Image: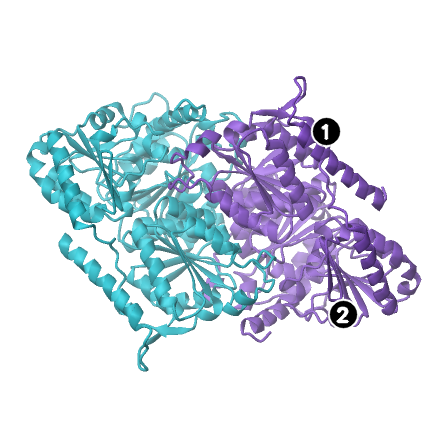
Chain colours: A purple, B cyan
Amino acid sequence: MGTEARKLQGEVDRLQQELQTLKAQYHSEDEELITISDYILKRLEQLNVTSIFGVPGDFNMPFLDFIEDHPTIQWIGNCNELNAAYAADGYSRVKEHSIGVVVTTFGVGELSATNAIAGAFSEMVPVLHIVGVPSTTQLKNKPMLHHTLGDGRFNVYTKVAEQITAAQAMIMNKAQAAAEIDRILMEAIIQARPVYLTLPMDLTTEKISARRLKVELPRTPPPNNPDVESYVIDEIMELVEDAKRDVIVLVDACAVRHDLREEVNDLLVKTQFPVYATPMGKTSVSEEHERYGGIYIGSITHPSIKERVENANLILSIGALKSDFNTGMFTYHIPARHTIELHSDHTLVRHAKFPGIGMKWLLPKLTERLSKFQEGASRIPVPHYKLDVPKESDDKISHAYFWPRVGKFFRKQDVIVAETGTSNFGVLDVPMPDQCIFVSQILYGSIGWATASTLGAAIAARDRHLGRTILFTGDGSMQLTVQEISTMTHNKLTPIIFVLNNKGYNIERHLHGLDRKYNDIADWKWASLLTTLGDIEGKLTQSYTVRSKSELDKLLDDEEFASARKIQLVEVIMDKYDTPRALQASAALTAQAAAGQL
Amino acid sequence: MGTEARKLQGEVDRLQQELQTLKAQYHSEDEELITISDYILKRLEQLNVTSIFGVPGDFNMPFLDFIEDHPTIQWIGNCNELNAAYAADGYSRVKEHSIGVVVTTFGVGELSATNAIAGAFSEMVPVLHIVGVPSTTQLKNKPMLHHTLGDGRFNVYTKVAEQITAAQAMIMNKAQAAAEIDRILMEAIIQARPVYLTLPMDLTTEKISARRLKVELPRTPPPNNPDVESYVIDEIMELVEDAKRDVIVLVDACAVRHDLREEVNDLLVKTQFPVYATPMGKTSVSEEHERYGGIYIGSITHPSIKERVENANLILSIGALKSDFNTGMFTYHIPARHTIELHSDHTLVRHAKFPGIGMKWLLPKLTERLSKFQEGASRIPVPHYKLDVPKESDDKISHAYFWPRVGKFFRKQDVIVAETGTSNFGVLDVPMPDQCIFVSQILYGSIGWATASTLGAAIAARDRHLGRTILFTGDGSMQLTVQEISTMTHNKLTPIIFVLNNKGYNIERHLHGLDRKYNDIADWKWASLLTTLGDIEGKLTQSYTVRSKSELDKLLDDEEFASARKIQLVEVIMDKYDTPRALQASAALTAQAAAGQL
């Protein structure tokens, strides 16, 4: 379908929705009815949701009955709600064109998920948070129920949710239920943010019209104003002309979050512009693409890449998200007059802002116009982005060795999850094969996220028939959410989990308190974790400890290990103080910022 | 010190505080200065705080330096923030006359603690939540920092905290720092609720006057209006006369939370009124007290106790907290015209409410007046509260057998923590020896609370030279917060942890979905947990699995086990469907309530 046709289809879908809302008020006798629970599940099915995460509680169990009985959607029972919401986040990130869903219970459950939902908001990940709440009668009468604050304030939890979600629906009767459910789902998709739905126990089985379900929810943003859009394209074309074809593309997180992989790829094929990615944009463009030049992260960038990016006459930035760690602590040396920024809901051409001109519709048209520069652009050389495994004299596993070495282990279509901190900075420099998906939480940076997120990522990878799911985390981070590896084993998922054991919070040491005791942690028997947490017979999992380069090499070269037929955990013994290059540089910049020098 | 003197001392302290606040505005050149960090720690020291819980993050580490360097306060590094806040809650509950303290980092850390802080609010537990936040410059300029929502809203986390804490202080300069710190600490103590403090990185080392520290914070509520108080006492006396000495005392949670153990005991000694406790009031009065008759929980009460409570001519209720599970699903059969309720900030005499008349000052005066009824009251017999171990024909460990049996294992001064759900209902009926402290979360009821709370409880018990700390939890609940047992081992604590392994969420099964898969959980190797999570050499811990009554008896009779010199975990294999009497009854009432029949 062409751009114009897709835009029109979006409009048609939207108008039909509006029509259905009105029609719903005039039920006919013989129309099809559906429970509110099944209405929700049907919508989720239409959005390709296969798995719902969460923890049972007495206020959500009536809804869980419907999930358990659903033919295509499976219930993934988590160990706790924070982990469940992280898993929904990971699922959403890897599934793409879909959403993550987490179900918790009133108060005690939903509040435990707060941090994960805030993380999804920050990082623009669509997640539906469904909370099972007391009956509508109880919500009105406000008795001193368990899970309340005991002071009659029944709206407290919703007020918390309002702070960290893009839209909320508190269903209190069946009349508006369908329209409300549809509204927040559309917000989740279009804004790429979490949304919040409360479902009272007694409404789970109430029946409503199924008519709206005949039209699927639109999944594209509203169209741009054609006059402004055409003006913006002309402006951009003029700048590109002026740039004498020395244009580079810089792809960032929002290109993936707002579903522009295809459009960006099309731009690159048709223009042959050199392309770079930010840390949060890593793998949004294939790192094996012949025009791909590597990762740009301000002052921390490898010098050869830094020079190419910062000296370009014009930078076309797609989906920028300029957070501290994503920009090398705000050290971009790119003047605004050399920059065009495409965003989901606005466009910046040098200093001029065009609100409402979103990249989803703008980019394809721009690509058509820019294709005429292909021949000139293709003549600009882009050095192949690679990272060699260094020769080191000792056998200790250093960061300088580890990351390039695991880079050789990666395969096409692997899903690679890196925890905030050491792992994230370490893996940045490692080129990943074509169609790999890199998952990280660089803006929000909540440690513990990666382990639980890997559960959701692995399920989404299975849904999409992608390759292996590989997690890199540290001993400190892993401790926050460790129990969720049990859910992975229980659900026969087979991620490979690398735990960097360096006796504490490595990133924190490098930011402050290098030798402080508060950065030390209790050491665990990492290689016994998988069996203790669920693999009672010892047949479903495999664990390893590697202490030297030779042990690491041997394991990574082992075809049985690489085939990832079981869940596997690798404890990697590293020096307490060693740290990746990018983290070292970033910590130095952070210290300067804290001291007011930046 | 007599009541009147203590009241006056409270007034003196308060006036001196006010004076110091004013004086602080006129610094003299030679006055003693102290960093804001040390000011906070000094106040905590004055409140007998010995341990602070939390997780390091880059925004709180400058403050952690001060904790680590403090001579008497120790840093307890937790595995995650939810657990840290639960531990602070447990510490506060067992320490008494003090507060719990948890330190987290901006956003990602503090939001993870949300549920635990809300629980402390609900259950009236004073906890200080200190959040390390960016520098004051960053807070004003709002760059897109990590741990933010990326949209410039830097006040979001504070808005969340406002919903679930009794007072907040966002320190932004040193001028008001001391007064603000003092204000929220006093609120925490007087309201018995959590409070919230944000500490910007750059202010941790700023120096302020130490003068206010010379006066300790008052720890008693404001005095009652003497005229109203005296009127209320007369009213109560009249009712007691009318009741022909058939008066019983019912003690509930707030008697402990608002620090009335001593006053209540004095009342019982001087009046000899029979006394009963609610589930949340359990052990607020010694269960070996000769006038103690057992637990009252509405319809769920043992019939002989129920009759005595409900047929009394007058009930003097102290610190009532009438939540669903604490009242047998609101099935009190006690008419208001037979009831006097003493609360922390008001008094109810039958239907009349007297705002501002708090029990802390009222009760001692009332006791003096009521002591004249001693002789008559002491003639009313109170059957000894006991629970025999039943004879059962098989060797399976049933709930009917387990709870009375562990009752025989309890010793004077044990701290007994029971998880929400099966354990809580099971242990209710078990009499506990003198000076035991029973810790539970019956109103808020967040599963996972008990394990992490036990960490704090065990530290407080050590501080107070109490006996053993004993936890009862289920396999489902334990999975939520399991990693915190590692912190116990790391800190050489020696709780005894009973994990009831019944293959899932037992309480949930009995509330809804008895055979639903969502109530099943992954089975773990429980007896390997302690070694895997920190006891690498296997010397610091001991684990057991008991599958029969005889195995259980043997273990409980083992003096080495009972001496609790190491941390010990006991996996107790129980039937999937078996459940305690009180839970069964409560589940039936809950089902009726959900169906609108109550």
For the question of whether residue B539 can be seen, the reply is no
SS class of the residue under badge 1? Answer: helix
Mark-to-mark CA distance, 2 and 1: 48 Å
Location of the N terminus of chain B by quadrant is: bottom left
Which quadrant would residue A459 be assigned to in this image? top right
Give residue A571's position: percent from left, percent from top: 59, 54
What residue appears at the point 75 percent right and 53 percent down from the top-left corner? A358
Q: Which residue is mark 1?
A: A214
Amino acid tagged 1: Lys
Residue B246: x %, y % from top left: 14, 29
Rendering coords of residue A228 (x, y %): 79, 55
Viewer-side residue, B206 vs A353: A353
- The chain letter for the residue carrying disc 2 is A
Regarding residue B250, the answer to whether it shows in the image is: yes
Q: Point out residue A233 in the picture as x, y percentages from the top left corner.
A: 83, 58
Q: Residue at x 55, y 34 (%)?
A: A171
The residue wearing badge 2 is A337
**Amino acid of disc 2:** Arg
**In-image side of A518 versus A528 (left or right):** left
Work out which residue is located at the far bottom of the displayed protein and give it.
B29
For the residue pair B457 and B44, the one nearer the viewer reads as B44
Quarter occupied by the C terminus of chain B = top left
As drawn, is B486 to the left or to the right of A436?
left
